[in-house]
Image (tube, rainbow, N blue to C red):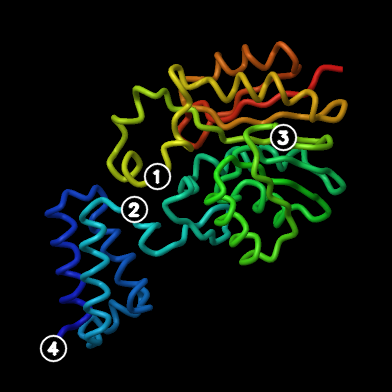
Amino acid sequence: MMTLQKLLKKGKERLQSAQIAEWELDAWYLLEYVTGCRRSMYFLHPDQEVTASQVRQYEELTEKRSLHIPLQHLTGTQEFMGLSFYVNEHVLIPRQDTEVLVEEALRYIVPGMHILDMCTGSGCILLSILRLRNGVTGVGADLSEEALLVAEKNRENLDVQAAFLNTDLFSQVEGTYDCILSNPPYIPSCVVDTLMEEVRDHEPRMALDGSEDGLYYYREIVEQSPKYLKPGGMLFFEIGYDQAEAVRSLMESSFQDVHVVKDLAGLDRVVYGTLRT
């Protein structure tokens, strides 16, 4: 008889032997995903029998995780700003660092504003803001048609009114906005191949690679965004931990009151400013 306890033990051993960084936690997540059994119930009934189909599914998923396929690609979900987002291999997995960008923008976004999320990916930035701030409208823009399909699914799942646009940066963007937000590709090309396997091999390179110095998209967005911002409009960026001064310097050509915000780890994470009038 296969029990929850025995199945979890097998999962932990498989992931640990594959040197998965968070092997114990991932084994737990996959057990909960397959069986629906939360930890509180597990500790009350560790000897509860699991079905043959659950055993097969769990073993298949732990095998895939042992190959460094991200956990979120196996379960299809990632929590962001307290909301559940669908993800797959065509979008970056939403990260807690990016919540700093949303939280900072929400300090300035008020009902009646119209916002643009450039390089929207899964739509997590735009859709979170629209869910958390009533009376705001917005557009998510991305070059990847596959990413936009994910964003559209998240729009439906979250029951949010939003528009999505397939465009190479601003080439198809029309109108003006009160705020433009972006978490663009910002990792230098030479660094992408050194990233952990889950990221390097399973998340879209086009969402990671910021060209030779990692600053290509910041330059382009800073240069083009003033034409698409209303007077006094604001530009918000997520940045890499070592890019604050470079991005601040780029922004100060067209923006004033440029600020840098740190994440929970104390690293520079967000740069934002107001269009010069």
Q: Position of residue 223 (x, y in %)?
A: 69, 18
Label 2 with label 1: CB-CB less than 8 Å: yes
Along the polypeptide, which appears first: circle 3 or circle 4?
Answer: 4
Q: Is residue 141 above or below residue 231?
A: below
Circle 4 crowding by C-alpha within 10 Å: few under 14, some 14–19, many from 20: few
Q: Is residue 127 above or below residue 245?
A: below
Residue 1: mark:
4
> Depth-wise, is mark 4 or mark 1 nearer the camera?
1
Circle 1 crowding by C-alpha within 10 Å: few under 14, some 14–19, many from 20: many
> Depth-wise, is mark 2 or mark 4 nearer the camera?
2
Q: Position of residue 117 (x, y in %)?
A: 67, 41
Residue 119: image quadrant is top right
> Depth-wise, is mark 3 or mark 4 nearer the camera?
3
Q: Image point 31% across, 34% down: which residue?
A: 195
Mark 3: which amino acid? Ile
> Depth-wise, is mark 2 or mark 1 nearer the camera?
1
